[in-house]
Image (cartoon, grey):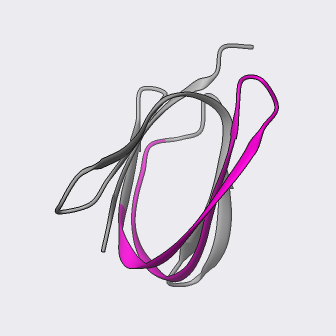
Amino acid sequence: MKGLHLDIVSPDKEIFRGEVDSVTLPGTLGSFTVLPRHAPIVSSLKAGTLAYVTKDGEEHIQDIQGGFVEMNENTVSVCID
């Protein structure tokens, strides 16, 4: 299965860009996970933990204060505070 392309940016810098197997985000209505071929989505994010698993199986965790996410055509774009 082809992985997702994930871009995580803040107003100051690019935090991560690469292929991942999954992304878990703290949505304002609850935490949710995005997998390959997920339906398009746009959501606001609240303070919490953003986690993603890279293609080599390594999990990365980032505490965030909020932001937005867009998923379209197997690309997840996250802008965080």
Can you see residue 35?
A: no
Q: Residue furthest right?
A: 57
In depth, the one of 16 and 4 nearer the eye is 16
Q: Is residue 63 left or right of residue 36?
A: left
Is residue 8 shown above or below 44? above
Q: Report the quarter where the N terminus lies.
A: top right
Q: Residue at x 59, y 38 (%)?
A: 38
- Which quarter of the picture shows residue 76? top left
Q: Magenta part of the protein: which range?
A: 40-68
Vertical order, 28 against 52 (above or below):
below
- x and y percentages locating residue 46 in the rendered image: 46, 83
Vertical comparison of 32 with 72: above or below: below
Q: Is residue 10 visible?
A: yes
Q: Residue at x 44, y 43 (%)?
A: 40
- The location of residue 42, given as percent across then percent down, is 37, 58
- Residue 10 falls in image quadrant: bottom left
Residue 6 lies in the magenta-colored region: no
Left or right of residue 71, residue 19 in this image: right
